Image (cartoon, grey):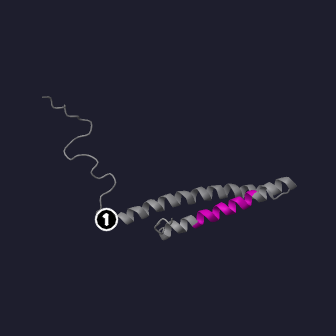
Amino acid sequence: MSAARRRLPDEVRAAAVRAWLFLSCTLVSLTVATLASYAHSGLLTPALLASGLGVFGTTWCLLEIMISRQIAAQRRRGPGSASPLAGSRERGRRPGIRRAPLRG
């Protein structure tokens, strides 16, 4: 039951690795912040700052994954190929004008 999956393009894989690294660092800093709050340590403020920056970085990396996947899909289609919206309207007809049904 092995599904044939295509390998992700290099830029998408690199973005995914960066996202996992940011997420893991964010979770570590969140754990440090939790333990520092239990210990009433002065390390709480830098750990919370690192967690906030990690959330921002993780979100940025997730957006980068989405954008790089779209770019890779466009490259895979190639130049001159039909775009997803090509042919969505009939030529010569303006949108919003409906023809009357033929009777008889």
Q: Residue at x 38, y 62 (%)?
A: 74
**Crowd around label 1: few <14 · some 14–19 · many ≥20 (10 Å):** few
Residue tagged 1 = 79
The quarter of the picture where the C terminus appears is top left
The range drawn in magenta is 17-30
33 part of magenta stretch: no
Rendered location of residue 92, percent (x, y): 19, 45
Q: Is residue 21 above or below residue 45?
A: below
Residue 42, by quadrant, is bottom right
Single out the residue that lies furthest toward the bottom.
10
Residue 12 in percent (x, y) is at: 50, 66
Q: Quadrant of residue 44?
A: bottom right
- Number of marks in picture: 1
Image coords of residue 3 (percent x, y):
48, 65
Instruction: Examine the residues drawn in magenta and state their main secondary structure.
Output: helix
Q: Residue furthest front?
A: 1
Q: Residue at x 53, y 68 (%)?
A: 13
Does residue 85 appear left or right of residue 5 in this picture?
left
Measuring 82% from the left and 57% from the top, which residue is drawn there?
35
Q: Is residue 92 left or right of residue 52?
A: left
Q: Is residue 18 magenta?
A: yes
Residue at the extreme left of the image, as rendered: 104
Residue 46 shows in the view = no
Q: Residue at x 62, y 55 (%)?
A: 56
Q: Nearer the viewer, residue 56 or 1?
A: 1
Q: Please, which residue is most extreme toward the top here?
A: 104
Q: Secondary structure under badge 1?
A: loop
Left or right: residue 18 compared with residue 75: right
- Amino acid at the residue labelled 1: Pro
